[in-house]
Amino acid sequence: MTIATILQGRGDNPIISISPGMAVVEVVALLADKRIGAVPVIEQEQVIGIMSERDMIYGLRKDGAKFLDREVRDVMTAPVITVTSDTSPLEALAMMTRRRIRHLPVVDDGVLVGFVSIGDLVKARMERIEGEAAAMREYIQTA
C-alpha cells in the first residue's frame, strides 16, 4: 500500500490550498468552515509551506489579536516536509512521529497531488490490519 492508494480511495475531492498573501483571519475561517486542521500554501504551483492550527495557536499566543491581520507568508511553517505518492503509509507515519507533525503534502515531480493527515494514515493502517485479521480468521475456519 502507498499514499497513492489512500488518495485514490478519496475520489476526486479537490485539494484545499491557500496563497501566501492571504490574511490569517481568512485562513481561520477556511479551516473552520471546511473542518480541517491545516492547508498547504501554494505559490507559482509550488508548495512553499503549511498553515496549521498549531501555527495559529503559537501566533495568537505571541502576537495576540494583531496576528490575525498578518499574511500567511510571514507565519506559515516553512520549509515544508513532503512525501511522494509512492511513500508507504508506515514511512509517512514514522516521519510524522519523528517530526511531530500531523499533515503532509504529497508532491510528485514538484506538483502537489494530495494532502494527508495522520488520521488518514491511521485509518488506512487500521483497515489493512482488520483485513488481514479477517483473512486469517477465514483461513483458520477453512483449514
Image (cartoon, grey):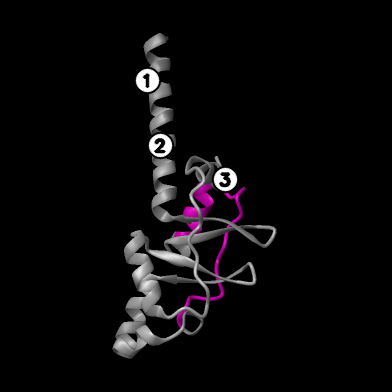
- Judged by depth in the image, the label closer to the viewer, 2 or 1, is 2
Outermost right residue: 109
Q: Amino acid at mark 2?
A: Glu
Q: Regarding mark 3 in the picture, which secondary structure is present there? A: helix
Q: Disc 2 and disc 1: Cα gap in Å?
A: 15 Å
Q: Regarding mark 2 in the picture, which secondary structure is present there? A: helix
Q: Amino acid at mark 1?
A: Arg
User: On screen, 117 above or below 64?
Assistant: above
Does label 1 or label 3 sit earlier along the sequence? 3
Q: Residue at x 47, y 79 (%)?
A: 72
Q: Would you say residue 87 sits in the magenta stretch?
A: yes
Range of magenta residues? 75-96
Which image quarter is the N terminus in?
A: top right
Image location (x, y in percent) of residue 7: 52, 46
Relative side of 100 to 108, left or right: left
Image location (x, y in percent) of residue 127: 40, 36
Q: Which mark is residue 137?
A: 1
Q: Residue at x 38, y 67 (%)?
A: 30
Identify residue for label 3. 4
- Judged by depth in the image, the label closer to the viewer, 1 or 3, is 3
- Quadrant location of residue 103? bottom left
Does label 2 or label 3 sit earlier along the sequence? 3
Q: Please tell me which residue lies in front, 91 or 62.
A: 62
- Quadrant location of residue 112? bottom right
Image location (x, y in percent) of residue 113: 59, 55
Q: Amino acid at mark 3?
A: Ala
Q: Disc 1 and disc 3: Cα gap in Å?
A: 28 Å
Badge 1 density bin: few <14, some 14–19, many ≥20, Cα 10 Å:
few
- Quadrant location of residue 51? bottom left
